[in-house]
Image (tube, helix red, strand yellow):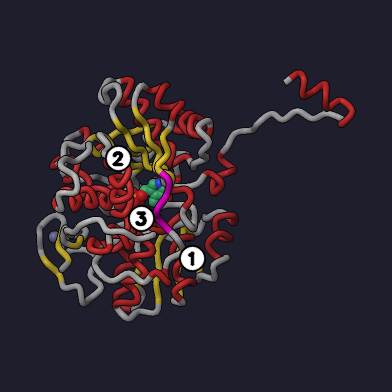
């Protein structure tokens, strides 16, 4: 059964329902179980997923490293752990949700899948569709950069540029998908959320955090992570919940704005502009659902500037991890919360590093590199 996150109305699993008539996102029940053994998180937590998972559809997503950040921990006076999602098959956490989403496509008997994205989700859906042998339709905005197109097209997906209000495309695609038999695994699809839960399962296999920091755009990721922790608690595998921190970029922060104004509904964020393009959704489809969760669970919402984001990106690189700007927002938020004293000393903080830096190379500033004749190399090495 699918249930509305706002009004509670129920929908059958036999049809491709994705949103409630009231406009809010649907989700599956809270699953319960115990942690078993197995090579992958899908096997160890098999009881928590809505159907039997076919590992032939997997590209090895999940089971990512949780890295203790020694230098940053010392600098910030906390115990900081980095959940490195950049090592997923298409270099972002989206693969976890796409893996579950593709199962849903096949379960419904569809042979076509789609998504609305110009970045990480597009590449992920294109890759998993190829793997599963279903046709993929990727809807992108007409001003997409050539570089991004290549990353999607290489998997053989049908890429379609759409002119018009890109924000409306999310809803338009769901409507057309229902009509034409294309399952659109968009950002906060109920089954995508089921895949994201696996991040929480992997974290508690290693440690119990006081805070989990989540870069947030549509709200799908943070909803998935929270659902994972709720299921672990319900199953008595943990006895308390961490504090969930929703992070947005200042230049596009509709959830943050509604949160500090104590509103129940988000409003469209006008003229969004941030370097963190992967989290630049001016009207997040799960925005209201995230507000409800933060309120209920005493969560925190933070916004960080482009300058703070770039600074955090460099800090992470000094720890040996290269992330894209959207993923550095988490560390920028931790720094801010720590400076404001909202995170106390020595607390255990996990920041989700959502996607890889190689995807956004063009956003890095210039680096000065010295050049020498080979005869002068010794002299040069001695001096540096
Ligand atoms: C998609 C994405 C996010 C945000 O996830 P939502 O589910 O849309 O909230 C954060 N960082 C990166 C790199 C992403 O690709
Ligand atoms: Zn509803």
Instruction: Say which residue label 1 marks.
Output: 127
Instruction: Say which residue label 3 marks.
Output: 167
Q: Which residues are magenta?
A: 61-65
Q: Are marks 3 and 2 in contact (CB under 8 Å)?
A: no
Badge 3 marks a residue whose secondary structure is helix
Q: Reply above or below: 342 against 149.
A: above
Foreground: disc 3 or disc 2: 2
Residue 62, magenta (yes or no): yes
Residue occupying image coordinates x 30% and y 47%: 205
Q: Are marks 2 and 1 in contact (CB under 8 Å)?
A: no
Residue furthest out toward the front: 37
Q: Disc 2 or 1, which lies upstream in sequence?
A: 1
Disc on res. 207: 2
Residue occupying image coordinates x 34% and y 47%: 217
Quadrant location, the N terminus: bottom left
Badge 3 local density, few (<14 within 10 Å), some, or many (20+)?
some
Residue furthest out toward the right: 375
Whether label 1 lies within 8 Å of ligand 1 gets the answer no
């Amino acid at each position: 059964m699918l249930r509305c996150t706002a009004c509670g109305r129920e929908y059958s699993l036999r049809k491709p329902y994705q949103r409630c008539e009231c406009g809010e996102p649907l989700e599956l029940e809270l699953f319960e179980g115990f942690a078993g053994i197995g090579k992958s998180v899908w096997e160890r937590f098999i009881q928590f997923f809505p159907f039997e998972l076919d590992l032939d559809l997997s590209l090895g997503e999940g089971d990512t490293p949780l890295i203790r950040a020694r230098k940053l921990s010392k600098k910030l006076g906390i115990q900081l752990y980095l959940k490195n999602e950049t090592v997923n098959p298409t270099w972002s956490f989206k693969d976890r949700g796409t893996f579950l989403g593709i199962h849903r496509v096949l379960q419904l008997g569809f042979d076509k899948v789609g998504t609305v994205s110009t970045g990480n989700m597009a590449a992920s859906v294109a890759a998993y569709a190829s793997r599963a042998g279903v046709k993929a339709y990727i809807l992108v905005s007409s001003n997409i950069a050539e570089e991004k197109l290549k990353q999607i097209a290489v998997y053989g997906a049908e890429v379609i540029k759409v002119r018009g209000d890109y924000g409306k495309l999310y809803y338009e695609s769901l409507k057309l998908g229902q009509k034409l038999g294309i399952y659109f695994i968009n950002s906060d699809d109920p089954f995508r959320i089921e895949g994201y839960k696996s991040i929480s399962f992997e974290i508690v296999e290693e440690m119990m955090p006081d805070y989990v920091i989540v870069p947030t755009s549509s709200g799908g990721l943070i909803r998935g992570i929270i659902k994972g922790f709720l299921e672990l608690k319900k199953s008595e595998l943990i006895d308390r919940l961490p504090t969930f921190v929703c992070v947005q970029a200042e230049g596009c922060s509709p959830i943050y704005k509604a949160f500090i104004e104590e509103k129940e509904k988000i409003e469209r964020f006008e003229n969004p502009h941030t370097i963190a393009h992967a989290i630049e959704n001016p009207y997040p489809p799960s925005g209201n659902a995230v507000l409800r969760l933060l309120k209920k669970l005493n969560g925190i919402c933070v916004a960080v500037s482009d300058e703070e984001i770039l600074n955090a990106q460099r800090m992470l690189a000094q720890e040996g991890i290269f992330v894209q700007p959207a993923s550095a927002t988490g560390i920028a938020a931790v720094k801010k919360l720590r400076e404001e004293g909202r995170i106390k000393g020595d607390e255990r903080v996990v920041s989700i590093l959502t996607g890889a830096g190689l995807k956004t190379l063009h956003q890095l500033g210039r680096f000065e590199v010295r050049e020498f004749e080979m005869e002068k190399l010794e002299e040069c090495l001695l001096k540096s």
